[in-house]
Image (cartoon, grey):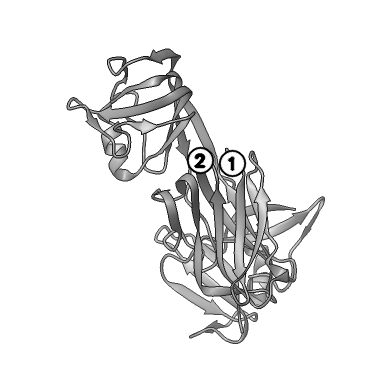
Amino acid sequence: MRKILFTLAAVPTKPFFTYICTIKKKRHTMRPHYPIALAWLRSALAIVLLGMTCTTATAETKQLWTGNATFDDWGDVVNINAQQMAGVSADDIVRFVIEAGEWAQLQVSYGTGWTCLDGLEACNVSGDYELVVTAQVAKALKQGIHIKGVGYTLKAVEWIACDGGFDSQHPALTWQNLTVSGGTKGVRSTVGLHRYGAVGWYLTEPLAADTYEALELTFGMPLKAAVIAVYTHGNGQRRRSVVKAGKTTCRLGIGTARGEVGSIALMSAEAQTIVLQQATLHAKDNAIEHTTMPQNAAKVYDMQGRCRKEMLKGVNIIVTTKENGEATAIKRINR
């Protein structure tokens, strides 16, 4: 099953809105209980298709430097000038491709003062090192960098430009609520985990096992190493599954959990950078719910298209309009 994001426009007096539908092979179906009211269905003939865009994000890799520089002592250095680093921004990744010997150490400094980046004064490395770029680090990198160290050979320095932020459709599964233990959290979608680091959510609004079949996480680039996906349910019980290296998705079958799912985490025994791109909840009626989180004013509709002051019991349609006029619609089940 593929998810396609349609950008639609109603009659000229209506704002733009987005709507998620499903496509099964050659047949295009819209289920009547999907997040669109019957009143909207009646006006569907007036809707004009303006564009169609896949929601999958990309992580483009660019070469900043390639070669075969051996670092035998602290006097050896590779410089990358400010012009080459000018496009780096928060949530990007700078990867140092390294063949490490015993006791290898990496140092990265920036600017004319050769000020070391935090944690990279003399960092022990056993292979490639990935630097998650924060807003503060981006300012430093734009001044140019100096790579030093001992006991390793530098093969390349790569800049991985991450496009887009993390999308979620559950109020507890937001980027703001994401917790990182043993690693660095980026601005929108990137997490740099140390060995045995973890990233996940403590759910203030637990996921009901009788409502959702699965939670699917999508990564912006393939996993460098395997991770263990674990969630707690019931009275603190845990369920685990292994997500292999090279995967770009992780599916947690929460539909068989006992009671409610209280926390979700990804744990890595190896240091790696994870780009969290999307969280999709699969409801038990097989409807795929996905949207960006409400950012501005939201309105609540019932299944007959009537605007309500507050959520009712059962199925509600939450329509959120952004500052640019685009709106999103999600289905929310209130029990």
Q: Which residue appears farthest toward the right when viewing the image? A: 26
- SS of the residue under disc 1: loop
Q: Which residue appears farthest toward the front when viewing the image? A: 102
Numbered circle sitting on residue 190? none
Return the x and y of residue 109 as percentages of the image width and height: 27, 29
Q: Is residue 272 above or below residue 20?
A: above
Q: Which residue appears farthest toward the left when viewing the image? A: 113
Numbered circle sitting on residue 272? 2
Cβ–Cβ under 8 Å for marks 2 and 1: yes
Q: Earlier in the sequence, mark 2 or mark 1?
A: 1
Residue drawn at (55%, 44%) of the image: 220
Q: Nearer the viewer, mark 2 or mark 1?
A: 2
User: Which quadrant of the structure image shows residue 110?
Assistant: top left
Return the x and y of residue 138 as percentages of the image width and height: 31, 38
- Per the image, the residue denoted by label 1 is 223
Q: Quadrant of the C terminus?
A: bottom right
User: Which quadrant of the structure image shows residue 137?
Assistant: top left
Q: What's under tag 2, amino acid-wise?
A: Gln
* Residue 51 visible in the shown view: no
Q: What's under tag 1, amino acid-wise?
A: Leu
Q: Is residue 271 above or below residue 65?
A: below
Return the x and y of residue 96 as percentages of the image width and height: 44, 27
Label 2 Cα neighbours within 10 Å, binned few <14 / some 14-19 / many ≥20: many
Residue drawn at (37%, 43%) of the image: 90
Return the x and y of residue 266 as percentages of the image width and height: 56, 54
Q: CA distance from mark 2 to mark 1?
A: 8 Å
- Image position of 95 (left or right of 257): left
**Of residues 293 and 299, the one drawn nearer to the viewer in this rendering:** 293
User: Which quadrant of the structure image shows residue 207?
Assistant: bottom right
- SS of the residue under disc 2: strand
